Image (cartoon, rainbow, N blue to C red):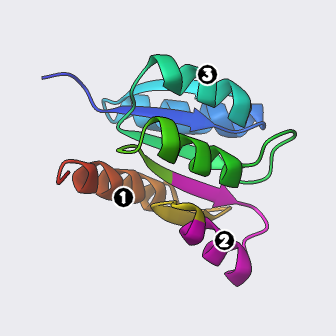
Amino acid sequence: MEPRSVLVVDDDLPMRQLLASLFRDEGYRVEVEHSAMAALAHAALTEFDAVLSDVNMPGASGLELVRELKRVRPGTRVILMSGRATRDGAEAARRAGAFDYLEKPFELERVLCAVGRAIEDRGRD
């Protein structure tokens, strides 16, 4: 059985490293990108079970990433993270098609659970 796969997208290097390490320790195949545009290019070539992305990044935002991934990889579940989470932000994420919306800082168990639920939900397709 192939390991579950996750793409981590964040312009903050320490956050990318933390999340990549967390998911690798849990047996995931993990790849990382520093921007929404790089993530889109990567996802066009490789299918992921879940994408975990920051909302606020230079260039295209995580919301734009969700919208575009819904077009090119409709089965991919995207979880957005934000250090400036608001009710309006959560609503915008839902409207864009995000599977979940996490406020930074978060407990690592919370992000593991969110990705696990996203992959389980994807398996229902």
First reached walking from the N terminus: tag 1 or tag 3: 3
Residue at the right extreme of this rendering: 58
Residue at the front extreme of this rendering: 71
Residue at the top extreme of this rendering: 45
Amino acid at the residue labelled 2: Ala
Magenta stretch: includes residue 82: yes
- Residue 20 vertical position relative to residue 89 in the rendered view, above or below: above
Q: Give how far apart the Cα atoms at labels 2 and 3 are.
A: 23 Å
In the image, 57: left or right of 124? right
Residue topped by disc 2 = 92
Looking at the image, which is closer to me, 24 or 124?
124
Q: Position of residue 68 (x, y in %)?
A: 59, 43
Numbered badge on residue 41: 3
Looking at the image, which is closer to me, 47 or 72?
72
Residue at the (56%, 36%) spot, across then down: 8
- Residue 113 vertical position relative to residue 34 in the rendered view, above or below: below
Q: Position of residue 19 (x, y in %)?
A: 55, 39
First reached walking from the N terminus: tag 2 or tag 1: 2
Image quarter where the N terminus lies is top left
Q: Residues within 10 Å of mark 2 (few under 14, many from 20)?
A: some
Q: Give how far apart the Cα atoms at labels 2 and 1 are.
A: 22 Å
Residue topped by disc 1 = 113
In the image, 69: left or right of 120? right
In the image, 84: left or right of 49? right
Q: Nearer the viewer, mark 1 or mark 3?
A: 3
Residue at the bottom extreme of this rendering: 87
Amino acid at the residue labelled 3: Ala
First reached walking from the N terminus: tag 2 or tag 3: 3
Residue segment shown in magenta:
79-95
- Residue 107 vertical position relative to residue 70 in the rendered view, above or below: below
